[in-house]
Amino acid sequence: MAIFKGSKTKPVEDDAKADPRLGHAKDVYMGGRFKIVTLDTIPAREVLGTFGLIVSRSYNFDSAFYGLIAQALEVNADAILGYRESVAFHPEGDRYYSCYGTAVRLKPVK
């Protein structure tokens, strides 16, 4: 007797291996060289310029979060302000994560 199961449409491979930018973004964030805040400002820091809203989505939260940082690093941002995240639940039980915020360049600390 054979039992047939439906195949999932989401990729099952490790996103960090597929995209080396995610590994670099994780290293930068975990090293404390990149700020992410839910506020509109960073206390005692001045914003020099904004690069606009950036969004990253994935079935894996780490890929969505570090993908957001990777996008910000590509435009030479120093931080993400107004960080938000959301999760959508698929009827099959999967979760789809979205992370977003405003990429900004900060004035250097003197």
Image (cartoon, rainbow, N blue to C red):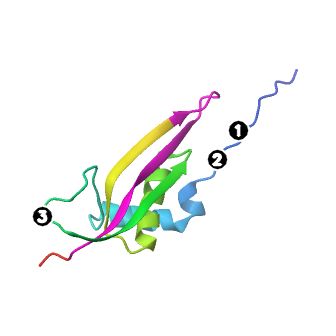
Q: Nearer the viewer, mark 2 or mark 3?
A: 3
Quadrant in which the N terminus is drawn: top right
Q: Residue furthest top?
A: 1
Quadrant in which the C terminus is drawn: bottom left
Q: Is 3 covered by the magenta stretch?
A: no
Tell me where the magenta segment starts and ends, as one range. 88-107
Identify the residue shown where x is 37% and y is 59%.
102
Identify the residue shown where x is 21% and y is 75%.
107
User: CA gap, disc 1 to disc 3?
Assistant: 47 Å
Q: Which mark is residue 12?
A: 2
Residue that mark 1 sits on: 8
Q: Say which amino acid is labelled 1.
A: Lys
User: CA gap, disc 1 to disc 2?
Assistant: 9 Å
Identify the residue shown where x is 86% and y is 24%.
2
Most foreground residue, 24 or 87: 87
Residue that mark 3 sits on: 44
Left or right placement of residue 60 versus residue 35 in this view? right
Secondary structure category for the residue under label 2: loop
User: CA gap, disc 2 to disc 3?
Assistant: 42 Å
* Disc 1: CA contacts within 10 A as few (<14), some (14-19) or many (>=20): few
**Residue 101 locus on image (x, y percent):** 38, 55
Q: Say which amino acid is labelled 2.
A: Val
